[in-house]
Image: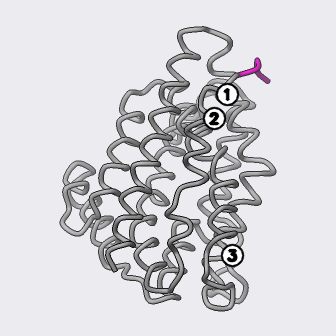
Amino acid sequence: MSKTFDSSSLDPLRESLFQHPVFRSVTTLSRLRIFMEHHVYPVWDFMSLLKSLQYKFAPHGSPWLPNGNGDIRRFVNEIVTEEESDVAFPNSETQYISHFELYRNSMHEIGADTNEINNFISCVIKNGLVNGLDCIGVPDPARKFMQSTFEVIEGEKAHCIAAAFALGREDIVPKMFKSLLGKIKITEIEAPIFHYYLNRHTELDEESHGPMAISMMSSLCDGDSKRVEEALQAARNALQARIVFWDGVHMAISEI
């Protein structure tokens, strides 16, 4: 589908991310609550990154018109299906659920506060994204992270959005979540839905979504040196934004 894409220049950032001290700091349920009350926002804005790709390559609406690369359409639609309507946690009220709703359910499970994320979504619905990002109650690290996400979306360069998605999300999530699972002191018995979310995301991204996302990004760059550099910079920005986000979450956890 695509030419080889060398992202080895990002390795130092990736390693800093995987070894971030925030993962070792989640040692109690109260600390996990703080972690999740921050992390739920990147879980939410992930879908906007994905849907912006779907809008470019598989736009909805009528009349339908053929558009772009069929391989990319297939990948984007496949991942949207699994992110918006994946297999729910066993014995749930519904058989399928979005990963965001699954995560929010896992917050309920451990007594984390979901009022602020719900208020944020209501504000976005009523008043738009800009006002939503200014909504009182959104943690500052989460606000800054979302702003970085929407900056690349608003740039409207498909290869840059794909790079932020592939190298800033899908490629790093398996190792990042494995790092968290390996260091977290909260057992699966204490937080079964949260563990299910982490394991499910890791499984999907490691086995299919990650490799396909990188292939999509490489295809969009098509060996063009300018596009490759722009894509690498978009990925670099995404990784740096994630590290800064984890810095803020770690600080918030350390304060309790």
In the rendered structure, which amino acid carries the disc numbered 3? Tyr
Q: Which residue is mark 2?
A: 11
Contact flag, marks 2 and 1 (Cβ < 8 Å): yes
Q: Nearer the viewer, residue 213 or 12?
A: 12
In the image, residue 124 lies at what x, y percent? 28, 58
Few, some or many C-alpha atoms within 10 Å of disc 1 (few <14, some 14-19, many ≥20)? few
* Residue 8, label in figure: 1
Neighbourhood count class around disc 2 (C-alpha, 10 Å): few under 14, some 14–19, many 20 upward = few
- Among numbered discs 2 and 3, the one appearing first in the sequence: 2
Element at label 1: helix
For the magenta stretch, what is the residue range? 1-5
The answer to which image quadrant residue 13 occupies is top right
Numbered mark located on residue 196 in the image: 3
Look at the numbered discs 2 and 3 and tell me whether their residues touch, using CB distance below 8 Å: no
| Quadrant of the rendered image containing residue 83 | bottom right
Q: Earlier in the sequence, mark 1 or mark 3?
A: 1
Residue nearer the viewer, 103 or 74:
103
Q: CA distance from mark 1 to mark 3?
A: 31 Å
Direction from residue 117 to residue 59 in the image, left or right: right
Task: Give the Cα separation between the discs numbered 2 and 1.
Answer: 5 Å
* Residue occupying the point 22% across, 48% down: 130
Query: Which quadrant, please, contains the N terminus?
Result: top right
Q: Amino acid at mark 2?
A: Asp
Mark 2 or 3: in front is: 2
Q: Position of residue 30 (x, y in %)?
A: 43, 85
Q: Quadrant of residue 255?
A: bottom left
Q: Amino acid type of disc 1?
A: Ser
